[in-house]
Image: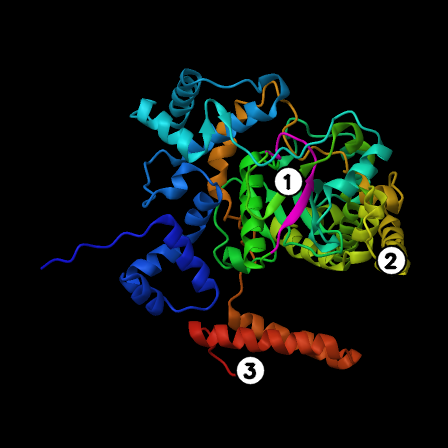
Amino acid sequence: MYKQRKGLSLVQKVYVIRETEQGQSSRRLARELGVGKTQICNILKRKTEYLAIFNSDGPEARCRKVRKTGNEELNKLMHAWYQTCQNTKSMKAPISGPIIKSKALDYAGQLGLEMFTASNGWLESFRKHHNILAGVQSSVEDSSTSNDVTIKEWESLLLRICQGYRPADIWTLDETSFYFKALPAECVSLGAEQCEEGQRAEERLTLGMCCSMTGEKEKLLLIGHPGKSNHPFEALRPNELPLKWCSNKRVWMTAQTFEEELRDLDQSMQSQTRKIILFLSDTMCHPNIPLSNIRLQYFPPSVLSKLQLLGRGVFREVKAHYRNILLEYVLSMKRGMVTYQQIARRITPLDAMYWIEKAWNKTSAGVINQCFAASGFKNLGVIEIKETCSATENFDQVGETLLTHFRSGQSGDHPEWKDFVSFDDNVATYDQAVGDSEPRLVEDCVSLTTRKLIPDMVYEECQPDAAQLLFSLNQSRAYALRNGDAHMMGLVMDLRTHLSRVACRSHSLTDPL
């Protein structure tokens, strides 16, 4: 007789996910819950989806099954629109059902969903999924402070706000944008552009940085342009990339991307059994989201421009390290009649991704701690990390030397090193045009599908196979031997081992090395 398949509640599914993360086997969990091993595996495949719904604390967390309706993109878009309305001071009045349905029909037409009717059933489902009661979205405990506070008042408020949190559990998240292939001669003209309408998107990248007061750092988020072809970078899986990548046509942080980042961070803190407080700027791209292990605390607008937490040194340190690497690369690639500008134009977002990772890793915990202290957190009993400024002075000296080499033989005005490092600090990182931002939501929502994609901009004229690369490494090996560079020799031998394995797998190795 056919045995009816047993369904599991969302709570049970989350239990499966948590137990698996602790090392429990799928077979044991299947036996414990009285289900098949295949059902356990299917739950694990959709764990991100289940955890996101469970963390929302909405009525849907009590549902047994999570069904796909075919309107997922529209629902994401409507949620982004709703959050935009709630985060706009002039639009915080409750939004009625007819208004939501009318807006849904408008967006459905733009997305080409001809069969969508915005029924009462859809409206009820949308409200339940996003925990919207009587037109107002339920949120975490209101932890905002008065908007009209002074710096001294803010410093005294911090003692109360951060009560119960260790310094290691006090975090911040912010974004900065930069031109990833700009050379010194270009920074004068580019520095005057704030890109408030998303201009020069293909030349820019936006970085999302998240770190704690004690210098603990999360993996960076890199937001770039999807490119003309939007091809996935198939050679590397998303989880193998040094940074997290997503894309949209204006290279901005959006509310949807921000929410995904917070959900990931919240899950990370859950797995560590930690509760943190996260300080944020009160902007349109930072919506208030209910989370289980993260408390969101927004800086009052009256002190935000004066505090600029990560802007007090962390942004500069990352950009300085990055532009050191950029200049080293451009100078080392100069050959014959090839210009620096031609070399820079061939730099891809993938190149920038690896350079930014190195820059972030070199950013010291001492610099992060000093930025927190300068932003009013110095009275929280933090033991300042004892680091001299010699490291910062050293890479500034290296940068000035590289810039001097770059200037030689170059005509035109060139900036000082400090100006080159921070010329793009004022470039927009999110949509600041509240009045006309709504038409962009459709485009930004659709661009979320490219979150796991990175434009493959490898040069088509240079695509050697593994065997050819193996033979070319002999020159690198000889160079390392001639100069007595043991570190380089180790890197070359590791790369040779890896390429040998790849070549054997693809049967491309035809001659002995």
Quadrant of residue 243 within the rendered picture: bottom right
Q: Nearer the viewer, residue 86 or 422?
A: 86
Q: Quadrant of the C terminus?
A: bottom right
Crowding near pointer 1: few (<14 within 10 Å), some, many (20+)?
Answer: many
Mark 1, residue position:
296
Q: Disc 1 to disc 3, how far (Cα)?
A: 58 Å
**Amino acid beneath label 3:** Leu
Residue 306 in the image: state x and y as whole percent: 83, 33
Q: Is residue 282 magenta?
A: yes
Residue pictured at 60% horizontal, 35% vertical: 141
Mark 3, residue position:
513
Mark 2, residue position:
398
**Amino acid beneath label 1:** Leu
Residue 308 in the image: state x and y as whole percent: 79, 38
Q: Nearer the viewer, mark 2 or mark 3?
A: 2
Residue 206 in the image: state x and y as whole percent: 66, 42
Q: How is the image coloured?
A: rainbow
